[in-house]
């Protein structure tokens, strides 16, 4: 199969032989003494999408404004004959309007059978003193193995892109067994962070608090491609409130009250469009209009009506990754709700 990848790709920097990557990087820094090499982590970005190297190089240029790293970009095409190409460059940004602070980028394009070559080639160029954040884009293929997971500190995925999420999450669970310290961050979960903050803050209101134990209806709206985000926030509600899943989106509270959930896919919705909890005459609601930068938070109880606005989560994956990198943490809440989410996923 012939390749559509260009023979020359100056957008990725200087093409170099694999064996000379580190030598050429040293030369790159020696050319300009005004540059300062900054790095707090290894950030690997993996994709099997054609053309992803160029797209991800532009993303890294933006991410390195606030996240100093050694970036390692990987594009794989297993349908072509075996080959391996590499490029090096640096993304530089002015610090305090004076010093040029730069982050290294190494780009690899691999074709053919890649599993062993991928590990040996890519991971030999990690900065061994720094943690490895691995952003896996797209479907979780067989290239993702327990051996690969064992060297990753933080794995960023987006389960909303998976056609068979149950199979992929089974691989994630095996990876967590092999590497218990692995931090897994699903962008589907990140997309509902401000919703979770908004819902929790509404229950600081005494009227909402008084209705908490009587909640018997939950409604969630989402866009067609973000069902996982809706199921994850449903799992969060159930786990935090101590509800038991009875099947068919029916739950039972600690006091034995039946709770019925309705999850709706709406074509014109934001990724997560609405979460509403109802108890008799009290409704607690957080909603998001598509493309709006704000969430609307509401409490309705007869004549009592309270509204407020809060920031909405970004929708673009690079912006969500930037949020994850800035927050850090162990993401223990996601691991806590994962069994319930997987149960709902069935």
Image (tube, grey):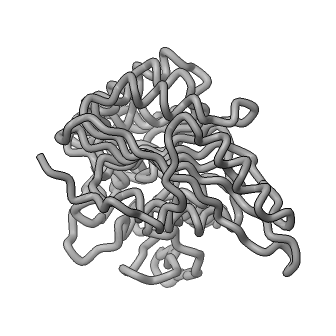
Relative horizontal placement of residue 179, taking residue 36 as reference (left or right): left
Relative horizontal placement of residue 163, taking residue 127 as reference (left or right): left
Q: Does residue 125 appear anywhere in the picture?
A: yes
Examine the rendered structure and indicate whether residue 53 appears above or below residue 108.
below
Residue 172, position as x, y percentages in the image = 40, 28
Query: Which residue in the rendered view is the most extreme toward the left?
Result: 1
Q: Nearer the viewer, residue 334 or 174?
A: 174
Residue 143 occupies quadrant: top left
Q: Residue at x 28, y 58 (%)?
A: 5
Query: Which residue in the rendered view is the most extreme toward the top?
Result: 178
Q: Nearer the viewer, residue 292 or 328?
A: 328
Q: Residue at x 74, y 49 (%)?
A: 39
Relative horizontal placement of residue 178, taking residue 310 as reference (left or right): left
Which quadrant would the C terminus be assigned to in this image? top left
Q: Nearer the viewer, residue 257 or 184?
A: 184
Numbered-mark total: 0
Residue 97 occupies quadrant: bottom right
Q: Residue at x 53, y 62 (%)?
A: 13
Residue 263 occupies quadrant: bottom left
Residue 216, position as x, y percentages in the image = 36, 52
Residue 134, position as x, y percentages in the image = 52, 41
Q: Residue at x 67, y 41 (%)?
A: 23
Relative horizontal placement of residue 6, taking residue 213 as reference (left or right): left
Q: Does residue 231 appear anywhere in the picture?
A: no
Residue 318, position as x, y percentages in the image = 49, 63
């Amino acid at each position: 199969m012939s390749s559509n990848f260009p023979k020359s790709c100056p957008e990725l920097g200087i093409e170099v032989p694999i064996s000379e990557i580190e030598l050429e990087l040293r030369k790159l820094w020696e050319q300009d003494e005004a540059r300062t090499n900054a790095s707090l982590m290894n950030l690997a970005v993996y994709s099997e999408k054609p053309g992803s190297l160029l797209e991800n190089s532009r993303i890294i240029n933006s991410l390195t404004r606030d996240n100093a790293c050694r970036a390692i970009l990987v594009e794989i095409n297993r349908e072509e004959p075996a080959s391996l190409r590499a490029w090096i460059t640096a993304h530089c940004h002015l610090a305090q309007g004076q010093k040029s602070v730069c982050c290294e980028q190494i780009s690899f394009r691999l074709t053919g059978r890649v599993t062993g070559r991928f590990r040996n080639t890519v991971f030999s160029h990690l900065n061994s003193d720094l943690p490895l954040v691995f952003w896996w884009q797209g479907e979780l293929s067989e290239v993702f193995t327990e051996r690969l997971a064992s060297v990753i500190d933080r794995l960023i995925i987006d389960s909303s892109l998976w056609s068979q999420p149950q199979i992929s999450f089974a691989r994630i669970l095996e990876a967590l067994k092999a590497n218990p310290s692995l931090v897994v961050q699903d962008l589907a979960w990140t997309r509902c962070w401000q919703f979770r903050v908004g819902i929790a803050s509404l229950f600081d209101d005494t009227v909402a608090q008084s209705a908490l134990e009587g909640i018997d209806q939950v409604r969630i709206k989402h866009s067609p491609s973000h069902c996982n985000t809706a199921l994850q926030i449903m799992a969060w509600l159930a786990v935090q409130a101590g509800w038991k899943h009875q099947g068919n989106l029916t739950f039972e509270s600690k006091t034995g009250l039946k709770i019925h959930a309705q999850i709706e896919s709406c074509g014109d919705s934001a990724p997560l469009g609405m979460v509403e909890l109802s108890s008799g005459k009290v409704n607690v609601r957080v909603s998001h209009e598509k493309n709006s930068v704000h969430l609307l938070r509401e409490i309705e109880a007869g004549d009592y009506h309270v509204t407020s606005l809060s920031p909405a989560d970004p929708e673009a994956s690079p912006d969500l990754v930037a949020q994850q990198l800035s927050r850090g943490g162990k993401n223990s809440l996601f691991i806590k709700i994962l069994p319930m989410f997987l149960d709902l996923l069935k």
